[in-house]
């Protein structure tokens, strides 16, 4: 599986095998990037590019899907995922600082995966990812009880920004933030140069 192979090469964009791609009739490209060798996919980024004829809603701007798995801030599952097990408790980030830092790393990893795709694979055969829409990852069912959605969004924004700063202009995607009050508040804090309260660096949102 792609995730298992990516664990063997952290920080690299690991490509799907051609055999696996041939089984995915909607895709022409698939890859994954992780930032550690953990056995669970929290923070992993998956980049899938659709066949031109299979783009959602027949919109040519819908070139692909970038998927990630947010950190667990509580032992819950989304609706339809089945019962919560006691073993899953070991995966929860009990410390709110660890939870927020994981969200930061997730944002960074997602943008690095997209940038590496644009730099090394986009061209004649595969389209460049020009823009991505960023939601509040792990801001719902899995949100840590001591952290609010706006702080999660702010951690995500700093991760995205730090990844963009080390990416050459021609490989950067435009960032489209998912509308909503938590993201709007986070963006306001971000423009003031503020960092999440549960963070080890910079002026935090609790100082204003």
Image (tube, rainbow, N blue to C red):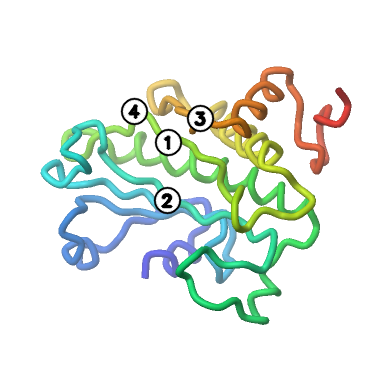
x, y percent for residue 125 = 17, 39
Q: In front of the other: label 1 or label 4?
A: 4
Q: In what element is the residue under mark 2?
A: strand
Left/right of residue 13 with respect to residue 29 in the rendered view: right
Mark 3 or mark 4: whose residue is earlier in sequence: 4
The residue labelled by disc 3 is 179
Q: Nearer the viewer, residue 154 or 127?
A: 154
Cα gap from disc 3 to disc 4, whole angstroms: 19 Å
Counting other residues with Cα less than 10 Å from the Cα at mark 4, is it few (<14), some (14-19), or many (20 or more)? some
At a point 40% along the width and 34% down the height, the residue shown is 132
Cα gap from disc 2 to disc 3, whole angstroms: 18 Å
What is the quadrant of residue 200 in the picture?
Answer: top right
x, y percent for residue 84 = 60, 76
Q: In what element is the residue under mark 4?
A: loop
The residue labelled by disc 4 is 130
Left/right of residue 175 with respect to residue 150 in the rendered view: left
The residue labelled by disc 2 is 67
Cα gap from disc 1 to disc 3, whole angstroms: 23 Å
Mark 4 or mark 2: whose residue is earlier in sequence: 2
- Relative to 194, say whether 50 is above or below: below
Q: Residue furthest left?
A: 53
Counting other residues with Cα less than 10 Å from the Cα at mark 2, is it few (<14), some (14-19), or many (20 or more)? some
At a point 65% along the width and 81% down the height, the residue shown is 87
Cα gap from disc 1 to disc 4, whole angstroms: 10 Å
């Amino acid at each position: 599986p792609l995730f298992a192979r990516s664990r063997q090469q952290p920080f690299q964009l690991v490509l799907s095998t051609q055999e696996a791609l041939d089984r995915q009739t909607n895709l022409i490209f698939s890859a994954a990037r992780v930032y550690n060798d953990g056995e669970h996919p929290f923070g992993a980024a998956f980049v899938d590019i659709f066949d031109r004829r299979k783009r959602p809603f027949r919109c040519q701007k819908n070139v692909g899907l970038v998927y990630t798995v947010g950190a667990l801030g509580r032992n819950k599952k989304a609706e339809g995922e089945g019962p919560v097990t006691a073993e899953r408790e070991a995966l929860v980030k009990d410390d709110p600082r660890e939870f927020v830092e994981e969200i930061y790393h997730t944002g960074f990893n997602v943008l690095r995966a997209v940038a590496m795709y644009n730099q090394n694979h986009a061209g004649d055969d595969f389209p460049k990812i020009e823009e991505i829409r960023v939601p509040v990852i792990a801001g719902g069912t899995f949100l840590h009880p001591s952290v609010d959605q706006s702080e999660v969004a702010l951690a995500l924004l700093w991760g995205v920004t730090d990844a963009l700063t080390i990416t050459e202009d021609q490989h950067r995607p435009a960032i489209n933030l998912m509308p909503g009050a938590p993201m709007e508040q986070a963006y306001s804090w971000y423009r003031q140069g503020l960092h999440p309260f549960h963070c080890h660096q910079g002026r935090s949102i609790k100082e204003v």
